[in-house]
Image (cartoon, grey):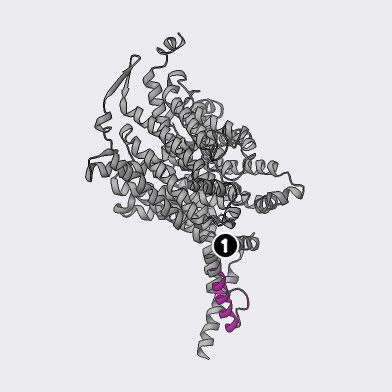
Amino acid sequence: MSATDTGGRVSRFGSAVAEGWTRERLGLLGAVALVLVAFAPPFQVYLFTDFLVVALFALGFNLLYGYTGLLSFGHGLFYAGGAYGIAIVLRDLGPVIADVVGAGISPLVTFVLGGVVGLALVVALAVPVGWLSVRLEEIYFALITLAFGMLGYSLIIQDPAGLTNGTDGVIVLLGTVDLGGFSLRIGGRRIYYAISAVTVVAAVYGVWRVVNSPFGTVCKAIRESPDRAAALGIDVSHHRWMTFIVSAVVVGIAGVLRAGLASVASPGLTHWSTSAIAVIATVIGGATYFYGPIVGAFIFLYIRWAISRFPALEAYWELFFGALLIAVVLFFKQGAVGGLLLLRDRLFGDGDADDAGSGGGGARDDGGQATAATDDGAESGDDNARADRGDNS
Amino acid sequence: MSLTSLVPLIGIADVVIGLSLGSRLFLIAVGLSLIFGVLGVLNFAHGGFYMLGAYVTLAVVSNVVDNFWVAAVVGALAVGVVGAAIEFSAIRRLYDRVDSDLDQLIVTFGFVLVIHETVRFVWGSGSYSIDPPDVFNFSVTLGGSTFNAYRLVVIGLAVGVLAALWLFITRTYFGSLVRGTSSDREMAAMLGVDVPRLYTGVFFLGSVLAGLGGALSAPLQSTSPALGDQVIIDAFIVVVIGGLGSMSGAFVGAMLIGMMQSLGPQFISAGSIAIPFLAMVIVLLIRPEGLFGGIGE
């Protein structure tokens, strides 16, 4: 009887926690965490800002990969597009804008205008590049986006128009807003963190609205079966093109933020190895979940930081992510978010928590399901992940 | 007449250098193309294999036997073993998946990182170079320009490999199994072909070719951990232009890109490194199957 009691207590505790995870409370918890980070030591603030930017980059990428089934190896092009857009505006138009609006407020106006120009540049790139790329599928889509990214890289390096300053890139100076007694250094770690956090949260919310709209549902239909989607009257390539543009814009916002954070827009942003960061973060986090890329980016940045604490290992952090990437694709495609959800179900069971016996049974059932998904690999793993996604989105 | 008027414009040395660059690209691209043609796997780690071939060759020459040719064979075979092990342990698990193509690409990309870091761990971040084997280490002067005779050897070997592969695929029993499996895996399996073993065999062969490419070009370039990442992109361009799965396409594509790398900068100062990528985009859009046919052609 005492064993049952313990079981009952555990699952009652479990259900209390599980029922407590409402969306509002989670949101509030997130907001509190975001505010608390602002008071962390400067390096931690920087690292967290870095995480937010990479998370947005991966989230934009995953709109195309996880939601529409197209793997791009060239999204660095739009990351760089946003970064170079703002960097060039800051460099070339700063003085002009200062003349128009006055020197005090001009850094802020230039920053905002630069962001808008960066996004306009991204749209101008994504419309033709996307229109051409979505004609191809699977490996061929990966190859053509890789080619477009590297084409952008070559042009930035060789700089035929004299805009991008070759391999050195364009230095980004954000400046200080000065309004009489009140001054604000936009590039200051905490200020820039606040700007980034607000922007990223707004962008993530926007993407969330998109994927939960009819538009997002069509994306998922195309991912599951392009032929059946077409049979339902969906113009598959047009929809892929639109998704490509939205995805590029989200990545572009991350690129604008990256320029200010790194204080430079450098050609490396459009190299395929930068595009690969979005792939790594997304796959590790779990491409079939909305929050997968965000969790993946968190793992990517913080494990890299943790590894860098050990000088002997510091230089070899890529080895860890290479091995992790292989392991996730081979054995557990749901990624980290899938793992967390599985863990939650195992710990807290699902449903009937008052009855100790069935609570335990539930946990066992879940365990069995998990093993099946891992052992059978591909098919069942995918189905499982997709079923989970159906529940969550 | 026309030849003499061309000579001052394009030095013969530039042509030889272009062809030797093309030859090393051919060796990596033909393995990549063979593996894609038969297994349907685009192996992102192929550049890593090429780099590994160069490193093993350098290590054997400087530590074990002072004979370049023996070392090159050891390097190529070692890479073949690594490749077969990767196919056997990882890629094999993905053939039956729904999205197998993209999963395979991501897994082989994982191996890009693993190989890169392992090489850096073993040999460090510095770059190594060796002299060409003594027999061929002399200068040839032709039409007023000078180049190393070893470059001609590499070109000759690449042509030899193309011929040998062609004979192997079209004239041998194993070659017919490869062609048959490439066009219909299920049917081949039903007719009694041991498909998994054949796949490992083809992956081994493709990896040996990449390793050989790395080994043979060790005397022509400095070998550093960044080598794999550079060369895989060139190899992607080559196989796309030539046609994924085509061996003759890989040869023509490789020579084209090699010549472009050698002669391009003389004709177009700005934008010359962009042209191969532009060509890749155009071929993918207009003729995604490449300029040449499928496997065995």
Q: Is residue A147 among what the camera can see?
A: yes
Q: Is residue A106 among what the camera can see?
A: no
Residue B269 lies in quadrant: top left
Expressed as whole percent of the image width and height from the top left, the position of residue B200 reads: 46, 53
- Along the viewing direction, whichever of A115 and B76 lies nearer the viewer: B76
Label 1 sits on residue: A381
Residue at the (31%, 35%) spot, across then down: B222
Residue A368 covered by magenta stretch: yes
Q: Is residue A367 above or below residue A258?
A: below
Residue at the (67%, 51%) spot, across then down: A216
Q: Is residue B283 above or below residue B46?
A: above
Q: Is residue B136 above or below residue A186?
A: above
Majority secondary structure in the magenta region: helix
For the N terminus of chain B, the quadrant is: top left
Expressed as whole percent of the image width and height from the top left, the position of residue B6 reads: 44, 12
Residue at the (50%, 50%) spot, across then down: B106
Expressed as whole percent of the image width and height from the top left, the position of residue B46 reads: 44, 44
- What count of labels does the image hold? 1
Residue B51 covered by magenta stretch: no
Q: Is residue A32 above or below residue A125?
A: below
- Along the viewing direction, whichever of A131 and B186 lies nearer the viewer: B186
Q: Secondary structure at mark 1?
A: helix
Q: Residue furthest top?
A: B1
User: Label 1: chain?
Assistant: A
For the C terminus of chain B, the quadrant is: top right
Expressed as whole percent of the image width and height from the top left, the position of residue B266 reads: 43, 19
- Along the viewing direction, whichever of A207 and A36 lies nearer the viewer: A207
Q: B191 left or right of B24?
A: right
Q: Residues within 10 Å of mark 1 (few under 14, many from 20)?
A: many
Give amino acid for label 1. Gly
Query: Which stretch is magenta?
Result: A348-370
